[in-house]
Amino acid sequence: MITAALQEREHYLNASYGIKSWLLTKDHKRIGLLYLATITLFFFLGGAFATLIRIELLTPQGDLVSSETYNKLFTMHGVAMVFFFLIPAIPATLGNFFLPLMIGARDLAFPRINLLSWYLLVIGGLLSLYAMLAGGVDTGWTFYTPYSTSYSNTWVIATALGIFVAGFSSILTGLNFIVTVHRMRAPGMTWFRLPLFVWSTYATSVIQVLGTPVLAVTIILLFCERVFHLGIFDPTRGGDPVLFQHLFWFYSHPAVYIMVLPAMGVISELVSVYSRKPVFGYHFVAFASVAIAVLGFLVWGHHLFVSTQSLYAGLVFSFLSYFVAIPSAIKVFNWTATLYKGSISYDTPMLYAFGFIGLFTIGGLTGLFVAALGFDVHVTDTYFVVAHFHYIMVGGTIMAYLGGLHYWWPKMTGRMYPEGWAKLSALVIFLGFNLTFFPQFVLGYLGMPRRYHVYPPEFQVLHVLSTAGASVLAVGYVIPMIYFIWSLRYGKVAGANPWGATGLEWKTASPPPAHNFDETPIVTHEAYDYRAVMGEVEVG
Amino acid sequence: MASEGRAETLALREQFDTEEQQKDASTLGMWIFLITEIMFFGGLFLVYIVYRSANAGVFAVASSSLKVYVGAANTVVLLCSSLTMVLAVRGAQLGERKTIVLFLILTLILGGVFLGVKAYEWNEKFQEHHVPGAAFHFEGLPPELQGRAQLFFSLYFAMTGLHAMHMVIGVGILSVLIWQARKGTYSAAYMTPVDVSGLYWHFVDIIWIFLFPLLYLIDRHLGK
Ligand code: HEM
Ligand SMILES: [Cu+2]
C-alpha cells in the first residue's frame, strides 16, 4: 500500500524518464546521482590498481610486475583516487544533492553550469582513462619536473590534461556553491542557522575556487614544456624544478582540505543527529572550517622540507603547519563534547562517525609528527607518510562519505538500507582499514621507502599484514555496493524523516519532489533544534 | 521603452524568486570567476617574478629586443576597447538596441586588431629565432646565457599566449552577444549577460595592463 503511494507521488526520480532526461538534466539531485555513479567507477578503478600494488608487495622480490609497471600502478592509483574520486566525492555528490535542500532552495544558482561540471569531470576522467589504457603514466600523482617534462616516456600529457579539465569541474562546482549559499537561502535561513555541512562545504568551495586555478596554470606550463619545449622548469635553461613543487603544493596541500573539510561537515551532522543534541559550540565549528580553509593556504612548504627550500622557509612552514591543528582539534573536541550526555543511538552512520573521529585524530596527529622538521627528515618519502595520508583520506574522508551516504540514502532513494548488513560492513571496513594502514606507520618508521616494489626481507611480515588488511577492506567496500543496489528495490520504504533530524532536507518527502519543496520553507529555528522536530518523528 | 521584448526575454529561471536575485547571482558568479582568473594569472606572474629577480641581467637584455611601440599600440587598442565595452553596457542600461550592437561590434573589431598585432609580433619572434626550442638563438649573449634568454621567451610566450587565448574567448563571447543583441534580447530590464561579459572583458584588459610593463618596460635601459 505504502509502495503504491510512493510510486504514484511524483518525485525527482519519476518526474521524467529516459536516458536523455538524465544526461540533460538540470536537477541538482539527478546531477548528484550522476556524480555518484561516476566517482564510484573511479573508486573501483583506483581500487583495482591498489589491489595489484598490494599483491606485488606480498613478497620482497619484484615478482608480479616490473618496476616500470609498478611505477605506473601507484601513479594511476593516486590519480584516480585523488582527482577523480576524493576531490569530487562529498561536495559533488552529497553536496550537490543536499546543499540546496539544506538551505531551502529549489536548485543551485546555476543548474546548467552544474551539469557542465559533471561533463567536465567525465571528459577529464575519460582523458585520464585513455592514458591509462594506452600505456599508463609513471610520474607519481605529483608529476614532479624535470622527470615529467623531459624524461618520462609515458602518457603524461593526456593524464595531466584530464586533471586540468576535471579541475574546471571542481572550480565551477565551488563557484556554484558559493553563489548559492550567498543568494539562495530560504527566508529566515541566516548564516548562523546554516547546518554545519553547509559551512564546511562553503569553506571547501572557497579552496576549490582559489586553489584549483593555480594547479591549472601549473599543468599548462608543464604541458607547454613537454609539447612546445618551453623551458620554464628546465634546469638546463635556468628553470627551477623546485618552483614546480611550490606551485603544485600550493594547490595540493589545500586540496587535502578539499578532501577532508566536507567530511568534517558530514560528521557534524551525524554526531548531532545520533546523539540528539545540537553540535557543541556551533560557531566555533563553523569558523574552524573557514580557519582551516585559510590556514591551509599557508603551509604547502611542509612538502618541500627535503627539497632545496631554505632552512628558514622550512622552519616557518613547520611552525605554520602546527596552526592548522588548532581548528582541526576544535572540531574533534566539539564533536566529542556533543556526545556528552547525548542520547546516543548506534545506527550505521554513527558507527562511521565514530570511525572518522578516531582515525582522523590519528591521521591529524601524525600530520603534526611529519610537520615537525626534524622528525620529517627521518620519515619523509617513507610508508610513514603513506600511512599518515591514508588515515586522513581513507580513514577520514571515505568513512565520512560512507556515513553520509547511509544517512541520506533514505532521502535520496526513498528506501532504507539493511541495517544489519550495514553495521557488519562498517565493522569490516574499520578493522580492514586499520590492519592495512597501521603496519605502514611501523614500516615507514623502520625505513621502508614509498614507491618501491622490492624491499628487504625483514619488512615482509608487516607488508603481508597490510595486504591481508587490504583484502578485508575490499570486502568491506563491496558489501555496501551490493546492498545499496539491492535496497533500491527491496529496501524498506523510508518516511520523510526516518532519523528525526532537524535539517530542511528532512522536511520534504523522500525522495524529494523535482523542485525540492512543495512550498518554500520558512526557517524559524537555529540548526539542530531537536525540540522543534519532536512531534514529527515517524517510528518505524 | 523596451516593453515588447520583456515577456519573452525576461525569462526568470525557475530556481530564482525574483529578477533581482537572478541578476545578483550572475554578477556574483562572474566576480568569483574573475577571482579564479586572478589566481590563474597570479601563478604565472609569480613564476615570472621569481625568474626575473634571479636572472635580472639576462631578462633585461632579452626583453629589450621586444618592440615597445608594438606593445604600447596594443595597450591603447585594448584601453579603447574597454571604453567601447562600457558604452555598450551603457547602451544596454538605456535599452537602446542600436547602441549596444554598434559598440559591441567596435569592441569586437578592437579585440581583433589586438590579436592581429599580437600575431604579427609572434611571427617576428619566429623569424628572429626567439622561439624557445632547438633553433633558439639570441645574438649578443654568450652560449652559457642562451638558456636563460630562452627562459625569458618561454615566459613571454606562455603569458602572452594565455592572455591571447582569453582574448579569443572574449571575441567569441562578443560575437554571441552581438547576435543576440541584434535579435533584441537585451533591454534595460534584462542585460545581465552584457554586464557580466563586460566585467570579463575589462579583466582581460587589466591583465594586459600588467603584462605590458612586466614584459616590455622593466629595466629596458639596462639591456641596451
Ligand atoms: C586533514 C587532512 C589531511 C590530508 C588529506 C593530508 C594528506 C596528505 C598527503 C596526501 C600527503 C602526501 C603527499 C605526497 O607526498 O604524495 C601528506 C603529507 C604530509 N602531511 Fe598531510 N594531510 C592532512 C593533514 C595534515 C596535517 C593536519 C598536517 C600537519 C599539521 C599534515 C602534514 C603533512 C606533512 C608535513 C606532509 C609531508 C610529509 C613528507 O612528505 O615527508 N597533514 N598529507
Ligand atoms: Cu600538506
Image (cartoon, grey):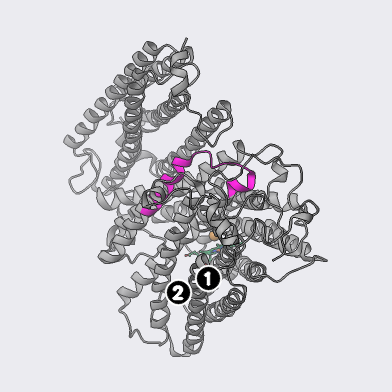
Q: Is residue A25 visible?
A: yes
- Taking the spot 38% from the left edge, 11% from the top edge, the residue there is B99
Q: What segment carries the magenta color?
A: A99-122
Q: Is mark 2 within 8 Å of ligand 1?
A: yes
Q: Secondary structure at mark 1?
A: helix
Q: Earlier in the sequence, mark 2 or mark 1?
A: 1
Q: Pointers 2 and 1 in contact (CB under 8 A)?
A: yes
Q: Nearer the viewer, residue B217 or B181?
A: B181
Q: Position of residue A55 (x, y in %)?
A: 40, 82
Q: Is residue A447 above or below residue B177?
A: below
Mark 1 = which residue?
A385
Q: Amino acid at mark 1?
A: Val
- Image location of residue A433, percent across then percent down: 55, 76
- The chain identifier of the residue carrying mark 1 reads A
Q: Position of residue B220 (x, y in %)?
A: 35, 29
Number of the label disc, if any, that sits on residue A450: 2
